[in-house]
């Protein structure tokens, strides 16, 4: 009997100088390399995926504060999957075992269902396609409501980008976002939106490329500057001249950026090993959008309706 690796079934795709390995659990991008260079922080096939590294986040990205929310007069309480802060983190799909739908040398499509449950009594089919081309790895997510009631929904990815061989502090970040979401220091609970030019710009304003240095970030940004094609782009470069770009379509109005600062600091092997860049279709705690004075972007997916979003990681 052949055993399945801890990260699930592995699907390798190739195109040009790119190679990617997709793990079935969480439809996770386990490795992505260009000409032998890592573009994301990888993990081993026979390893339980560390946290949410590379995972598909749905039916919500980021946090539901206290794991509690209310919709149409009904109250729900989610399992606290971020126990240190007491929140429900990154949805329900990240630990599902996605099944293959279609595969070729340069692409693979995986699918899973989020079944109705006490804390989320809606039925969604999540399908995601990974495709390698000359311009990098594109992931497209399609969510269909196969139930009978409108479902709250959001999605996003969770890659940790790697610019090159230098430490993260020496990488240069370009992030074209005009507003950042202030959060509490201890639990990252949303408070208010601020202009990055006025709210601690040395920490939060990356519209002009500059070195990350010792900046510690675990914040959501919005008001994104997009090209004429409607695409937003975050660029990360290494002093050696290598780099990586993550771009995404108009479906994602938010992006979470995290410098991977861990409790215990440098004693932790993954501390500041990569920069998490997470395009999101909605804001943190979007299931509680009524608490906030900004548009959280939560989708209400009608029965039979489908939502789609896509993003791409490319070498520079």
Image (spheres, rainbow, N blue to C red):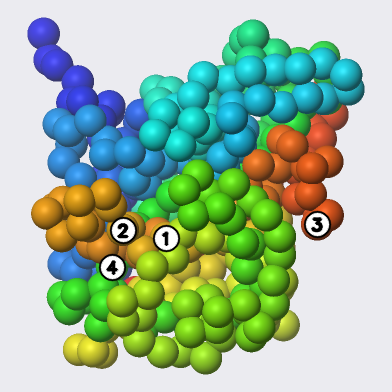
Q: CA distance from mark 3 to mark 4?
A: 32 Å
Q: Residue at x 80, y 57 (%)?
A: 294
Q: Is residue 117 above or below residue 240?
A: above
Label 4 crowding class (10 Å Cα cut-off): few <14, some 14-19, many 20+? many
Q: Residue at x 36, y 29 (%)?
A: 25
Label 3 crowding class (10 Å Cα cut-off): few <14, some 14-19, many 20+? few
Horizontal side, residue 8 vs residue 133: left or right: left
Q: Position of residue 157 (x, y in %)?
A: 49, 49
Q: Position of residue 258 (x, y in %)?
A: 42, 60
Residue contact at pointers 1 and 2, CB within 8 angstroms: yes
Tell me the residue that label 3 is attached to.
294
- Give the secondary structure at mark 4: loop
Extreme residue in the right direction: 72
**Can I make out residue 128 in this image?**
no
Tell me the residue that label 1 is attached to.
258
In primary-sequence order, the first of circles 3 and 2 is: 2
Q: Nearer the viewer, residue 311 or 151?
A: 151
């Amino acid at each position: 009997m052949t055993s399945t690796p801890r990260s699930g079934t592995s699907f390798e795709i190739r195109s040009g100088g790119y190679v990617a390995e997709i793990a079935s659990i969480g439809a996770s991008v386990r490795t992505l390399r260009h000409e032998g260079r890592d573009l994301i922080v990888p993990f081993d096939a026979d390893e339980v995926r560390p946290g949410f590294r590379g995972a598909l986040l749905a039916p919500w990205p980021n946090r539901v504060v206290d794991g509690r929310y209310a919709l149409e007069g009904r109250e729900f309480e989610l399992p606290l999957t971020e126990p240190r802060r007491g929140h429900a983190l990154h949805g329900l799909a990240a630990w599902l075992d996605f099944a293959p739908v279609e595969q070729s040398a340069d692409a693979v499509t995986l699918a899973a269902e989020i079944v109705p449950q006490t804390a989320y009594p809606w039925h969604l089919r999540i399908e995601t396609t990974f495709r390698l081309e000359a311009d990098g790895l594109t992931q497209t997510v399609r969510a269909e409501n196969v139930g009978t009631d409108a479902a709250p929904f959001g999605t996003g990815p969770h890659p940790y980008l790697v610019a090159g061989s230098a430490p993260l502090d020496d990488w240069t970040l370009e992030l074209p976002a005009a507003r950042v979401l202030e959060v509490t220091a201890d639990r990252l609970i949303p408070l208010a939106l601020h202009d990055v030019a006025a709210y601690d710009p040395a920490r939060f304003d990356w519209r002009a490329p500059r070195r990350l240095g010792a900046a510690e970030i675990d914040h959501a940004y919005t008001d994104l500057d997009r090209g004429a094609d409607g695409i937003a782009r975050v660029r990360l470069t290494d002093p050696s001249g290598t780099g990586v770009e993550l771009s995404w379509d108009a479906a994602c109005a938010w992006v979470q950026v995290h410098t991977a600062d861990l409790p215990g600091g440098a004693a932790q092997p993954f501390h500041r090993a990569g920069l998490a860049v997470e395009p999101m279709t909605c804001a943190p705690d979007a299931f509680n959008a009524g608490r906030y004075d900004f548009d959280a972007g939560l989708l209400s997916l009608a029965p039979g309706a489908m939502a789609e979003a896509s993003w791409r990681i490319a070498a520079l």
